[in-house]
Amino acid sequence: MTTSPRRPRILVAGIGNIFLGDDGFGSEVLRQLPGRLGSESVRVTDYGIGGMHLAYDLLEEWDALVLVDALPNRGSPGTLHVFEADHGSLAPTPGLDAHSMDPAAVFASLNALGGVAPRTIVVGCEVADVADEMGLSEPVRAAVPDAVAAVESAVAMLVDAAAREV
């Protein structure tokens, strides 16, 4: 009797504050994803500003995390960046912060809880405006379809990588 290989568990997490303009990028991308990833081993969750909730969920056994977030404006609003997070280079944040959604604070909280961050792919977009308002700016809104495709590609790559490790 042969057993099928274990399917990798991947968490796709959107983060950000929808009341701060482009900071709601992660939430908007995740709103476009339901039903598109088609796997029981992939969980798609919009954490909004619930950094502690994400840290607690990361205590479960995950093979990988795809983190969708707004990135600081470096001169090119709407520019999409996809990269693997280097957890070792993130500045540690002492203690637990239940209200922080900064990824470094989330991973520091996870470490404080005794967890270890899984391999993390970040799909981020440079913001144009994070003023007190709902809705994305035009350049960031235009990046959403490409971000959805980037999330799908990242998940496919992570599933393939996990299958090769078996």
Image (cartoon, rainbow, N blue to C red):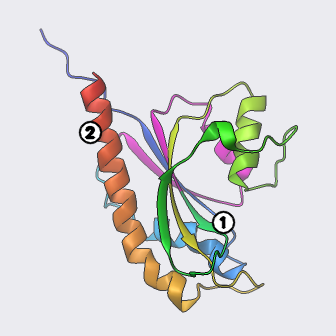
Q: Is residue 155 above or below residue 129?
A: above
The residue identified by callout 1 is 16
Tell me where residue 10 appears, x and y as whole percent.
43, 41
The residue located at (73%, 55%) in the rendering is: 102
Q: Nearer the viewer, residue 143 or 43?
A: 143
Q: Earlier in the sequence, mark 2 or mark 1?
A: 1
The residue located at (83%, 43%) in the rendering is: 93
Q: Could you say whether the residue bearing mark 1 is in a helix, strand or loop? A: loop
- The extreme left residue here reads 1
Q: Quadrant of the N terminus?
A: top left
Specify the segment rendered in magenta: 39-67
Please say whether residue 10 is visible from this viewpoint. Answer: yes
The residue located at (76%, 38%) in the rendering is: 109
- The extreme right residue here reads 95
Residue 35's image quarter? Answer: bottom left
| Distance from Cα at disc 2 to Cα at disc 1 | 29 Å
Answer whether labels 2 and 1 touch (C-beta < 8 Å): no
Tell me where residue 32 appears, x and y as whole percent.
41, 71
65 lies left or right of 146: right
